[in-house]
Amino acid sequence: MVLPDASGDVLSEMDVDAFRRLFPLRFFETHLVKSTRPDGRSLAEARETSSALGAVASADGSALVKIGSTRMLAAIKMEVMTPSKESPDEGCIAIDFHMPPICSPTVRPGRPAEAAPVVSKQLSDTISRTYIVWMLMVLFLMLLCCQQLLPFLTIPVVSMNDDGKVVVLSGDHGGKEPVNKGKRKLTLSSIPFSLTCLLHKNYILADPTAEEESVMETLVTVVLDSSGQLVSLYKPGGPVLAYTSAIQDCVALTRQRARELQTILDEVTSGMEVD
């Protein structure tokens, strides 16, 4: 069978699903020339996003976020730690990212997802640049989850036990003398907002799906702080970008996405009190 050019009416020549499987790149390009995507979004449109706080009762903070058909659960646990001699006044943040086989057919049972250490490192670098932390154990993390959780975390009251170790106090403190005067809110220097864009020829696709990423390889992830300043720019593999205009367009799309996420964040947290 002879297929028409990408700009032609290819979808009428054969079954859509078969064409999508056999010629995935051409399938997507037939949509790109019309400035649309298979899921109905425009090129600059991110997937629908929603979230809910308090998904894990045993955690100090948790959030369940849905972006399109993707769901991510984040849980944060605060623990007392001994600071290093090099940084006696600094805490730390530990990120543990899991992607079990049920999440994707690309993840094999019994083996960790290849993307897991990369995602953990990228998230750790981004959050460390934008947050002043105490001691956080972050599990199953998505950046949007963290945006919602951290403003509502409080540093607990602690005391010294008989062995000289710092322990977290609860309730009436059990008669022990607290080291700090009371709970205090976690200090945030800024809130990061991120967006991944897919670059293909002269097109820029905001918030690509896994299928789109598998077909078109050039990805750029932009992270901005709450003031719109660039925090990080991440480009894993793909060809070298010859022009800065594409990056500037990605930054502009990220600023637009940041405003959308801020609205979602305000809606989720409205009416909630920070201790």
Image (cartoon, rainbow, N blue to C red):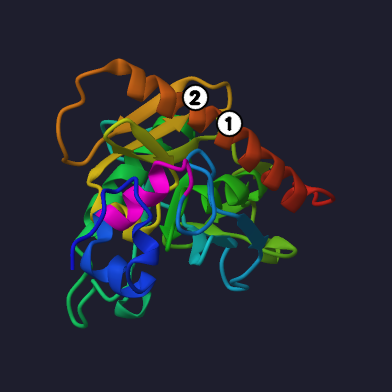
The answer to whether residue 155 is seen in the rendering is no
Q: Is residue 21 above or below residue 50?
A: below
Q: Which residue is nearer to you in this view: 86 or 49?
A: 49
Per the image, is 123 magenta? Answer: no
**Which residue is under mark 1?**
256
* Residue occupying the point 29% across, 78% down: 101
Q: Is residue 103 above or below residue 109?
A: above
The x, y position of residue 189, in whole percent, is: 54, 28
Alpha carbon separation for disc pair 1 and 2: 6 Å
The quarter of the displayed image where residue 139 is located: bottom left
* Residue occupying the point 22% across, 68% down: 22
The answer to whether residue 224 is seen in the rendering is yes
Helix, strand or loop under label 1: helix
**Label ID, residue 18:** none
Q: Residues within 10 Å of mark 1 (few under 14, many from 20)?
A: some
**Which residue is under mark 2?**
252
The x, y position of residue 184, in whole percent, is: 67, 42
User: In the visual, does 143 lie left or right of 102?
Assistant: right
Q: Say which amino acid is labelled 1.
A: Gln
Q: Which residues are magenta?
A: 26-36
Q: Residues within 10 Å of mark 2 (few under 14, many from 20)?
A: some
Q: Say which amino acid is labelled 2.
A: Ala
User: In the visual, does 53 lie left or right of 207?
Assistant: right
Q: Quadrant of the N terminus?
A: bottom left
Helix, strand or loop under label 2: helix
Q: Is residue 57 above or below residue 153?
A: below
Q: Which residue is nearer to you in this view: 114 or 53?
A: 114
Q: Is residue 76 above or below residue 231?
A: below
The x, y position of residue 133, in whole percent, is: 48, 39
Whether the residues at callouts 1 and 2 have beta carbons within 8 Å, the answer is yes
